Amino acid sequence: MSNGLSMSQEEPKNQLQQPHEGASEGMVTHAEQKVPILADAKTTVTDKVLPLPGEPDCDYCENKRFVISSTGELKPCPRCNVAMMRKIEQLRAFSSLSPRTAQQNFDNFQTTFNGITDAVLELCLMQAKSFAENHENRWLVIWGSRGNGKSHLCASIYNHLIQRNIPAIFITFPELLTALKSTINKDATTEESYYERLNIFKTVPVLILDDVSAESSTPWSDNILFEIIDYRYRHLLSTVIVTNTELDLLEPRISSRLQDTTLCTIIENAAPDYRIRPLHVKKRQSFTPGIS
């Protein structure tokens, strides 16, 4: 790839394997083995690590926070769930969060104005709920003009997943680019930290990417977007893409993947801009939906 990005960098380092298909979340099978994460050379297999302050004491994983499944996969302990919670907290730093987005959910997403229900917004809400409830190996692509609640739906999906301890990132594409650029400095470790951060976006279990646009794209930003989308596309990683741009106008390699209906549910949000609705129409209780 151009601009110093290599497809050979795609495979994440030390990525933990996810539970094998068919295993129920939170269930422990008889074939799972306790596994120690050695802190130093003196630690033995039978040593039980003391839990960190505020974390539960788990006899099953002996506070190592990981177990080995019957297929030999290393996975977070399904009883204490501490490893998964740590991952969620780590990813929170990369998400586009604010006091406003923390309040946004499916219940306060407005679909009725002045007594009239907007069928387009009802469809968008239904598909967003469906993805949040059953996101495995699914993509949701929402496109349409600004100001009609797309970001509210992104925040709602994210909040729904986090409440169920599912690791996710909700970020706008401009903020994602800024997060990558911030690793580019004069340090000797620049390349390593750059690709490590890029791999976070490529491998996170659920990526909710808002504000993807062709308006300010550059060869570098197109390459970054393609590398993330292509990796997630090939590995069937759950993804939400929201854009103000018609899909055909995006970079061809990106547009092609986003329009693959064998993987993607594609919704056009053709609702009018919330900002230009009459004031008496916008009023509803004490909360109004987010706009994008």
Image: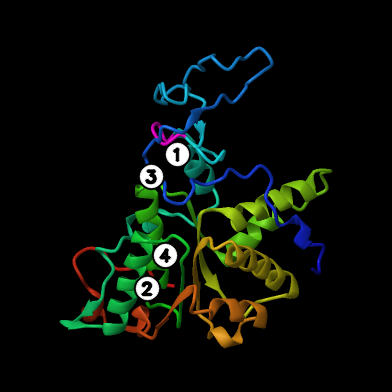
User: Could you tell me which secondary element the residue under label 4 belongs to?
Assistant: helix
Task: Kindly identify which residue carries mark 2.
Answer: 149
Quadrant of the image containing the N terminus: bottom right
Q: Nearer the viewer, mark 2 or mark 1?
A: 1
Pointer 3 with pointer 4, Cβ within 8 A: no
Q: Position of residue 146 (x, y in %)?
A: 45, 79
Residue 194 in percent (x, y) is at: 73, 52
In the shown orientation, is residue 13 left or right of residue 243?
A: right
Residues drawn in magenta: 77-81
Residue behind mark 4:
154
The answer to whether the residues at label 2 and label 4 have Cβ atoms under 8 Å apart is: no
Alpha carbon of mark 2 to alpha carbon of mark 4: how far?
9 Å
Secondary structure, mark 3, is: loop
Indicate which disc, 2 or 4, sits on the residue closer to the N terminus. 2
Question: Mark 1 highlights which residue?
Answer: 85
**Amino acid under label 1?**
Met
Whether residue 209 sits left or right of residue 110 in the image: it is: right
Disc 3 versus disc 1: nearer the observer: 3
Amino acid, disc 4: Cys
* Mark closest to the chain's N terminus, 3 or 2: 3
Identify the image quadrant of the C terminus. bottom left
The residue where tag 3 is placed is 25
